[in-house]
Image (spheres, coloured by chain):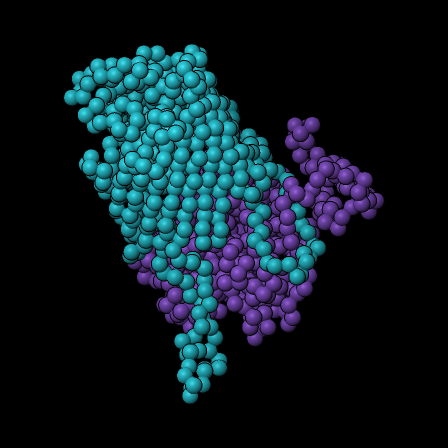
Amino acid sequence: MAQESQPESELRLEAKDLAKDCSSFKTALACGQVLFTDHPLHIAVGGIAPGNGIAVGPALIYDWNANENWRLNFNADAVASNNGSWRAGVYLKALFASSKPVKVIHKRPDPTAKPKTETLFGPVPELNFYVQSISLNKLNYYGLGPFSSRQSLALYGMQETIVGGNGVYPIGKTGLALFGELNGRLVSLRGRHGDTSPSIEQLYTESSAPGLLKQPGYLQTGEGLRLNRDFGDHFSLQWSGTLQQFVATDSKYTFERWALDFSHSIPLYSRSTQRRAPASAAVGPDQSPAPFEESRHHTENLEGAFGLRVLLSESIVPSGHVEPFYFQPTLGGSDINGDRGLGSYADYRFRAPNLLLFHGSFEHSIWGPIGATIMADFGRVALNRADIGFDHFRHSYATGVTIRVGGFPQVWLLFAWGGGEGTHTTGYINPGLLGGSNRPSLF
Amino acid sequence: MPTGIDQLKHIVVLMMENRSFDHMLGYLKAQDPRIDGVTGAETNPDTTGAPAPVKPLAQYQSQLQPDPGHHFEDVKIQLYGDPPGGPTMQGFVKAYFQKRQDVNHSREIMYCFAPEKVPVLTTLARKYCVFNRWFSSLPGPTIPNRAFAHFGTSFGKVDMDLFYLGEKYPTIYQRMLNENRTAKIYYYDQTLGMAFILQNQPQIFGTFSQFQADCQSGNLPDYSFIEPNYADHTGDNGAMLASDQHPDHNILAGEEFIASVYMSILNNEELWKGTMLLIVYDEHGGIYDHVEPPACTPDEFQDAATGFKFDRLGIRVPAVLVSPWIPEGTVIGTADDNFRKFDHASIPATVTRQFIGDFADRSPRELSADTFLDILSLPVVRDDYTGFETGKQALGAPQPQRQLSSLLQNEVETYSKIERHLPADQRTNIDVSKIQTEGDASAYIQQVMAKLNPQAAQTAR
């Protein structure tokens, strides 16, 4: 009898689950779980890019641990949305695990040394490889710079194919890591007709939308350093600095970009268990303290935190060169990768080679798993690096509720306003709950 | 009352995932015959009828793909065979064959770890206390077994139903808070505790880094339950490996996590003297064990779909108790103590007994569960030291001429004992008393491994 391979077995087991759980209405929930989450095949559902609807399609996930060291995850999906946009990609994540057993020691450390935290595990190196093509039918373009007008909205479509990879190499358990990437990119733009807003070529030219007439191929490299540290329950930070090189087949479009992204979280309450003196310990002069009453431990039943993020991104464009508008970062709603900034504005509202964003937030538990949050964004884009400063900021505010799991907010439902251009109601889930993504950035 | 219990201020439970006793600790029997592990002669028939023996060839990862079955129906096959009716504990290979129809692969469900592959768990088991008879609470999967650790019952559930809200009995955490005591679930970054607890989240939940900070400051709650990292995931500064040891997650990452929990307590001397750490696995994960689960007091709940009355425990799991008040080399569950048995209901039962006292509002299973405070039996605290550090830092380059360490000497003796179970013509005939260097030990161990599994040795070459 032929022996079954692992992929064959997984497919057979999934078919069995499907037959068991999807044959009766009573098991609809289990059936949904099989259809949308089971491995190796399932139906992928999710936003494809702001303004392009929800995309649905088949996905294949296959985990294979090749030996004691390598943990491999293959992921392939092909999804299409209701406005005709689509994305197809194949992704491979490889994690390297050590195979050297922990060492037993019998020598007692210096007894006078202060107690220290001992963490024997830490992050491991990660490699990602990807081949992805994405076609987006409706993207907003308001012109470049901080003073673009809402009335100058034009629409365009774009297809981008990216082939390459990236890697993260942690430096021991310091919280520091090196980041590197290398990929090739092919972009092709198209107009979008039939909407109330004009197509991009009807309003803009190569000078007002660099890259509109010609989209060269790119070799893109990147290097970076990341720092991620917790300081007990007082403070945590995530810092990153990256430098990217975009080398075009037509050298006029070659440019570089650097970015600094500093995120911080400051909990309002200590999560530590505290010793609290007994109430009777504070006694008057004529009273005797209760001698046998021990101090009690307690922990706060409140949770809240302030957050602050500062993002600065600047492009280095040599004289005579231009940075294509479709690779320039945006502020407003969400950008093409789904990252949020100035939430009350329309998606992609402000676009320029240089960007500065401050994001402040406060979140607090209210009752049970429910919390409340308030956020404020201040940011601007700039055509020239020298124009980045603390004036002409756009602002956006948001408030809403959070759903807390395990003591921390994991789901946000937000109403955003401010800036005089309307409001936005949005919701999002902590991407960590969804398993994260190793898809490449589109710019 | 023994001094250790008088001094006991903190109970810490670390619950790992899905490995059986024999798989993780079985080969310790060669080092200490009181440990009810494997002799090397245990087998299960494969689907061709050929016996598949236990072997000390388990790897950190890559062997248990796909995940072995461990739901109620799978465990029935593992316990009673397919078709049922034969001798018990003989259905593991056949059950795994149902997951992947590859005869050779199905036999790997019998593989166990050589003790030196998992030195954290095996060293703590030998240095402190190992339970021969700690069983999962029911023959089923993760969630209902973990429910027993939190509630003392799964309220009649044997499946992965996540909804445990508004149930009849309070969690051990709520009981503790009601008595003005402190209790916390410390988790890595995603918690299974969310299935059981929505109220008082800030009081009850904390992250693992908070656990370490609390150990350092000496402010650990009265009761702490620790959850490992349940999934590999990308982080900003590299990927974090799952440390729960669920198949086919990396076992070494779990070893490092267990060592980190232990070292965090050990490094604060005052905390160390007042803390008891239980390391236990939620269920066997479909992996072979040779001890038949015993009958137990039925719960007041029953699973409607299967009719199961919770009157039999699940398959045996590794459980190790650590405290400086425990005599070195304690083995619980032998003929000397009339084979005392425990399950996860013993956890809330023990915590309740230590910190709350009489408390009637509990399930029949918890009320009848044995407790383990008495194992802290020494009159004075131990002053020996056992610590861990990462292999990468400590191993360095091989030094074949270096004199044999006592640890390696133990390993050589273990392999010698294993070898004695082989047919005479398959033994190496090496006199282990003459092994003096690390190089000699390495050559000997490799030869024994080659005798145990010639095919694997050939592949390795």
Total of numbered circles in the picture? 0
Which residue is situated farthest in the left direction here? A196
Say which quadrant the C terminus of chain A sits in.
Answer: top left
Q: Residue at x 20, y 37 (%)?
A: A420
Residue B387: in sight, yes or no? yes
Q: Please tell me the colour of chain B.
A: purple
- Residue, far right: B434
Q: Position of residue B153 (x, y in %)?
A: 39, 58
Asked if residue B231 is positioned above or below residue B120 in the image, the reply reads above
Residue in the picture at 56% in, 53% down: A117
Which of A65 and B207 lies nearest the eye of the viewer?
Answer: B207
Task: Report x, y in % for residue A145.
Answer: 30, 26
The chain drawn in cyan is A
Residue A198 sits above or below residue B4 on the image? above
Work out whether residue B185 or residue A25 is closer to the camera in this orientation and state it: B185
Q: Position of residue B56 (x, y in %)?
A: 64, 41
**Seen in the image, is A220 located left or right of residue A429?**
right
Give the residue at x 56% y 66%: B274
A263 with respect to B438 (left or right): left
**In which quadrant of the rendered view does residue B310 lie?**
bottom left
Residue B279 image position (x, y, % from top left)? 54, 55
Name the image quarter holding residue B129.
bottom right
Q: Pick the residue in front: A331 or B202.
A: A331
A295 shown above or below B441: below
Residue at 45% across / 54% down in the picture?
Answer: A233
Res B431 quadrant in image? top right
